[in-house]
Amino acid sequence: MDSAQADTPSLLARARRGDQAAFAALIRMHQASVFSIGYRMLNRRDAAEDLAQDVFLQLYRKLDDIESVEHMGFWLRRVASNLAIDWLRRAAWTRGAPLEEGVEIAAPQPDEDPLMDRELLRLLGELAPAARAVMVLRYQEDRDVAEIAATLDMPVNTVKSHIKRSLTAMRGKMIGAQLVTAEELP
Amino acid sequence: MNEEFENRLRRAMRPVNPPEGFAERVLRGLPERAAPANVVPLRIARPAPVSAWRRFSAPAALAASLLIAVFAGQHVATRQAEREEQAGLAASRELMQALRVTSQKLDLAFEAVQHPAPQPAAEEENRS
């Protein structure tokens, strides 16, 4: 835990009193998570930024209801995921939209395969909104099944089912595209 | 093998940062947050001093009214009972009078039956 995270309770208290610098610090601590949920869900950076701004605006209004640092993280993931699912269900423009160019153009690590990453994200974008949210919370946010169920108001077995079916579908398509071999199937 | 695929997925889905200046843009869009209100205790209004007469006049007037109402009620009830008694006595006197008259009439009728008047034929014989 770095010093900013250690100070989060006091940041929270200051932000509640209207201290904008404290609220900005809270935003910076959580912006990557919230923005990435929007980005992986909507496949568009501009839409992801709009969604993240909306989420932090809601957080600002609900600061008095936030009980702790952990609650804030859970609350942000919950609002971001559900808002993204709503946007996807309401707007057909995101369905099948290609990933934008120029994102994350960092030098690849030795074990990275940018082509495969790109294909995995494209396949993620083909999943239904609820299944996509489950996968984002599981593999991007590294949340366990019970927390995902609580975040998305979904039974635990439904979460498990989404994960299993999504992994099977994605692996099947990767094999079809000859990006993975059949040995990688479970 | 399954785990390896999941790890690939995790690597592909690493969180990414929003564009530069994101936090500042959020702050610019924030509404004014109402500062916590300073709560100033209200001064409790002290009632103006009231004289003993004004303080007790209303209950005293109420009690007097109640007493007057009770006594007046009793007086009216007594007068009503007296009137009813007088009316009863008068009715009783009238009844006694009526009984006396009836008795006298009956006596006369009885006398008439016991001692009838002389026959008209005898009177005619005497005339001729």
Image: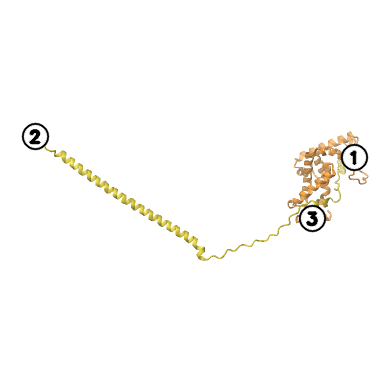
Chain colours: A orange, B yellow
The answer to whether residue B52 is above or below residue A27 is below
The reply to whether the C-beta atoms of the residues labelled 1 and 2 are less than 8 Å apart is no
Q: Are marks 1 and 2 on the same chain?
A: no
Q: Position of residue B82 (x, y in %)?
A: 33, 53
State which quadrant residue A17 falls in.
bottom right
Query: Mark 3 sits on what residue?
Result: A20
Q: Residue furthest front?
A: B128
Q: CA distance from mark 3 to mark 1?
A: 41 Å
Residue at 79% in and 41% down? A87
Determine the secondary structure under disc 1: helix
The reply to whether the C-beta atoms of the residues labelled 2 and 3 are less than 8 Å apart is no
Residue A7 seen anywhere in this rendered image of the structure: no
At label 1, the amino acid type is Met
Residue at 82% in and 55% down? A4
| A34 with respect to B100 (left or right) | right
At label 2, the amino acid type is Glu
Q: Position of residue A37 (x, y in %)?
A: 82, 44
Query: Mark 2 sits on what residue?
Result: B124
Q: Nearer the viewer, residue A29 or B43?
A: B43
Precedes in sequence: disc 3 or disc 1: 3
Q: Nearer the viewer, residue B49 or B74?
A: B49
At label 3, the amino acid type is Gln
Query: Pointer 1 indicates a residue of which chain?
Result: A
Query: Pointer 3 indicates a residue of which chain?
Result: A
